[in-house]
Image (spheres, rainbow, N blue to C red):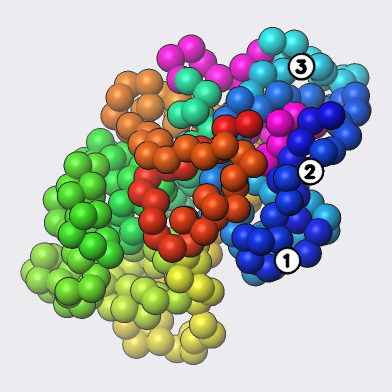
Amino acid sequence: MPRAIRIHETGGPETMRWEEVEVGKPGVGEVRVRNTAIGLNFLDTYHRSGLYPVALPTTLGVEGAGVVEAVGPKVKEFKVGDRVAYAQPIGAYAEVALRPAERLVKLPGGIDDKTAAAMMLKGLTAQYLLRQTYKVKKGDTILVHAAAGGVGQILCQWAKYLGAIVIGTVGSDEKALLAKKVGCKHIIVTSKEKVSQRVREITKGRGVPVVYDGVGKDTFIDSLDCLMPLGLMVSYGNASGAVPAFSIGILSQKGSLFVTRPTLTTYVAKRENLVQSARELFGVVKKGVVKIAVNQTYPLREAAQAHRDLEARRTTGSTVLLP
């Protein structure tokens, strides 16, 4: 019987269990996928801890790649043997899983399974952030927090390709080297410098039109001070904890600013949007414009240790779990 990493209660990594699960035949609109690689994300820790509630018990994980083993009724787009990848819904930390066909995309040649598993959630997130939430254009100077992280590295490379000047923040000198490698023209080490002050220096007092912030609580208010009037604060993650409540009046005081809290779920709710976004992502990866750094792999059964390392900031780039 296939195994999966499941939780029966929320809490720390110790709640994660490696257990047998029954995987039946695919139902209407479903595909049975044998996973070959599974992506690790901060989102998984939010599901595990209860920050983002999910029905229990549940199999963790939202992104992966694998091979189609069986297709259910009314599935026309996929056949047995197809290589596929996905980002959402939950249930990826498994050797074998039933997935909704409408949430799968076919993997093109030239993209291996580990790369695909490492980039679906993070890469599709970067796609909507750069190409839809705020359309980055040539000559823009933008701020990317956690530039050495999984989403951060993709954002920086892609933004540079689009012609933007990227200011990246990192937590250490070691991560600063990584940020430079992925295209940051300016790097701010947050333990040594105040971000808004440095951004104002770099931009000669103007500020930036957009801030991409996956950190949350620790960076939110200072990020507002990095923006030019009518600038857009994009808060897409909570790596340091959820952003605390704030008075909306602060946005008028700091220059009629905009704030958004987007999610990938909304941006790829329609299948055609998912397919189009994935096509664009695969395109920049195949061109070599965006390189996906899989810097750590763990056996799937050791997912709890992977969570500990991710939360302790011991990882860089992307991490993949191998069934």
Determine the CA span between mark 2 and mark 1: 17 Å
Query: In this picture, which residue range is highlighted in magenta?
Result: 82-111
Q: Nearer the viewer, residue 121 or 5?
A: 5
Point 52% across, 24% down: residue: 113
* Residue 229 lies in quadrant: bottom left
Position of residue 40 in the picture relative to residue 24 (left or right): left
Indicate which label's residue lies in the foreground, 3 or 1. Answer: 1
Point 51% across, 73% down: residue: 241
State the mark number for residue 10.
1
State the mark number for residue 19.
2
Picture layout, residue 199 above or below residue 65? below
Mark 3 vs mark 2: which is more N-terminal? 2
Mark 2 vs mark 1: which is more N-terminal? 1
Determine the CA span between mark 3 and mark 2: 21 Å
Point 60% across, 47% down: residue: 303
State the mark number for residue 69.
3
Indicate which label's residue lies in the foreground, 2 or 1. Answer: 2
Picture layout, residue 21 above or below residue 101? below
Determine the CA span between mark 3 and mark 1: 31 Å
Position of residue 172 in the picture relative to residue 302 (left or right): left
Q: Secondary structure at mark 3?
A: strand
Residue type, mark 2 in image: Glu
Position of residue 314 in the picture relative to residue 59 (left or right): left
State the mark number for residue 33.
none
* Residue 31 lies in quadrant: top right
Q: Where in the figure is residue 51, as x and y percent of width and height?
A: 65, 69
Residues packed near mark 2 inside 10 Å, few (<14), some (14 to 19) or many (20 plus): some
Q: Nearer the viewer, residue 263 or 47?
A: 47
Picture layout, residue 212 above or below residue 180? below
